[in-house]
């Protein structure tokens, strides 16, 4: 079987390549170049990542193909990201990157070039139950990435391989070290998918205008100034520039609300302030990977959150969600992902 593996130059995809070779698959590596606006910046690791990918491919004796999806990334992922920010939402570009790039452009390339399957280094599983294919949580619950895969097309499942699904991250690094793969101790990438670990407000200033406004408390009293509501997210604590206020407790401030009509950022001083807690929310842009067997399911409203019990009501174009316990910092534009035990049911965008 011919498999096209997404090889990023990190330890996870390196070990995925090794495991596929060990299983006897005919593996070709594909290195995706998806961001070109500032390749020369200190935050862009594309050249280093490609050199690492090339060394891994050479060591494992597999072909390496470069593919450039920068235009598609800008059109389908980054433009969405900016549009959502301008609407006052907090988007998740990594989910859309998986949907439109890794599991659309990359898979289209694979099948146009006669590959039988694609593979990535995601910590997830494809599980077969009664001849049906489902997305399931990985063995390493702390690294499980089904949250980020909740918007992909379920019809691809029979042709997707996740070689790391039954491994702990610590074991992946041990395999890489044992096999003398140069990425065995490489730091995991963080930040926005393909854009990297750059200072977020400084980066956004290249694409979004500065729009100064007031920071107010829950009584609508001005206590500071902001440079644009799109630089902040619900529940945020760092970078608010508030401190040393007279007649105020020296407690941390948290973003509670963004009022775009008045260009105001409302903040509160209690981590569990009532304005930061919600039991109910609504969901749009839902992508079902498996239809729920009952109204009682579990859900995550952010990556690495523990599963939260809730009840759902499915309407024509929206879903209402009522949690058993109030949820902190429910953020419009972020994604909620539903589960039944280990099976990922799919996810959608949070509305309030």
Image (spheres, helix red, strand yellow):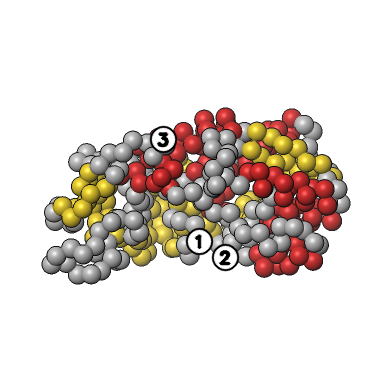
Mark 1–mark 3 Cα distance, whole angstroms, equals 29 Å
Residue position for label 2? 142
Q: Is residue 194 left or right of residue 244?
A: right
Q: Which mark is residue 207?
A: 3
| Viewer-proximal residue among 113 and 200 | 200
Residue under the image location 59 percent in, 59 percent down: 144
| Viewer-proximal residue among 174 and 36 | 36
| Viewer-proximal residue among 108 and 282 | 108
Q: Regarding mark 3 in the picture, which secondary structure is present there?
A: loop
Q: Regarding mark 1 in the picture, which secondary structure is present there?
A: loop
Residue under the image location 76 percent in, 46 percent down: 54
In the image, is residue 222 above or below residue 142? above
On the question of residue 319 being in view, the answer is no
Q: In which image quadrant can residue 243 be found?
A: bottom left
Task: Between label 1 and label 3, give the one nearer the viewer.
Answer: 3
Q: Position of residue 349 (x, y in %)?
A: 43, 45
Q: Earlier in the sequence, mark 1 or mark 3?
A: 3
| Viewer-proximal residue among 319 and 244 | 244
On the question of residue 265 being in view, the answer is yes
Q: Are marks 1 and 2 in contact (CB under 8 Å)?
A: yes
Q: Is residue 40 left or right of residue 320?
A: right
Residue under the image location 62 percent in, 52 percent down: 135
Q: Position of residue 300 (x, y in %)?
A: 46, 57
Judge the density around disc 1: few (<14), some (14-19), many (≥20) Cα neighbours within 10 Å. few
Residue position for label 1? 304
Mark 1–mark 2 Cα distance, whole angstroms, equals 7 Å
Mark 2–mark 3 Cα distance, whole angstroms, equals 34 Å
Q: Where the N terminus falls, by quadrant?
A: top right
Judge the density around disc 2: few (<14), some (14-19), many (≥20) Cα neighbours within 10 Å. some
Q: Which mark is residue 29?
A: none
């Amino acid at each position: 079987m011919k498999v096209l593996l997404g090889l990023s130059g990190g330890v996870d995809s390196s070990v995925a390549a090794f495991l596929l070779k060990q299983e006897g698959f005919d593996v070709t590596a594909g290195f995706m170049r998806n961001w070109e606006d500032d390749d020369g910046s200190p935050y862009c690791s594309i050249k280093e990542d490609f050199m690492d990918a090339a060394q891994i491919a050479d060591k494992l004796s597999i072909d390496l193909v470069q593919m450039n999806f920068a235009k598609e990334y800008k059109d389908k992922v980054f433009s969405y990201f900016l549009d959502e920010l301008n609407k006052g939402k907090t988007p998740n570009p990594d989910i859309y990157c998986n949907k439109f790039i890794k599991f659309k452009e990359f898979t289209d390339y694979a099948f146009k070039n006669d590959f039988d399957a694609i593979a990535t280094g995601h910590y997830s599983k494809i599980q077969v139950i009664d001849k049906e294919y489902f997305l399931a949580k990985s063995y390493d619950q702390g690294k499980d990435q089904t949250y980020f895969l909740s918007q992909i097309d379920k019809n691809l499942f029979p042709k997707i391989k996740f070689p790391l699904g039954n491994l702990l991250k610590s074991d992946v690094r041990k395999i890489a070290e044992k096999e003398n793969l140069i990425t065995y101790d490489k730091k995991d990438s963080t930040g926005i998918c393909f854009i990297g670990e750059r200072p977020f407000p400084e980066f956004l200033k290249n694409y979004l205008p500065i729009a100064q406004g007031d920071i107010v408390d829950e009584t609508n009293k001005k206590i500071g100034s902001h440079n644009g509501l799109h630089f902040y997210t619900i529940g945020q604590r760092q970078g608010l520039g508030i401190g040393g206020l007279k007649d105020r407790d020296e407690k941390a401030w948290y973003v509670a609300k963004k009022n775009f009509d008045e260009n105001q950022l409302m903040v509160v001083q209690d981590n569990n302030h009532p304005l930061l807690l919600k039991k109910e929310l609504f969901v749009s842009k839902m992508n079902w990977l498996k239809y729920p067997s009952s109204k009682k399911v579990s859900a995550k409203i952010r990556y690495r959150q523990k599963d939260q019990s809730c009840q759902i009501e499915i309407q024509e174009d929206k879903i209402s969600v009522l949690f058993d316990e109030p949820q902190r910092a429910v953020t419009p534009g972020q994604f909620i992902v539903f589960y039944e035990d280990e099976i990922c049911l799919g996810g959608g965008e949070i509305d309030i």
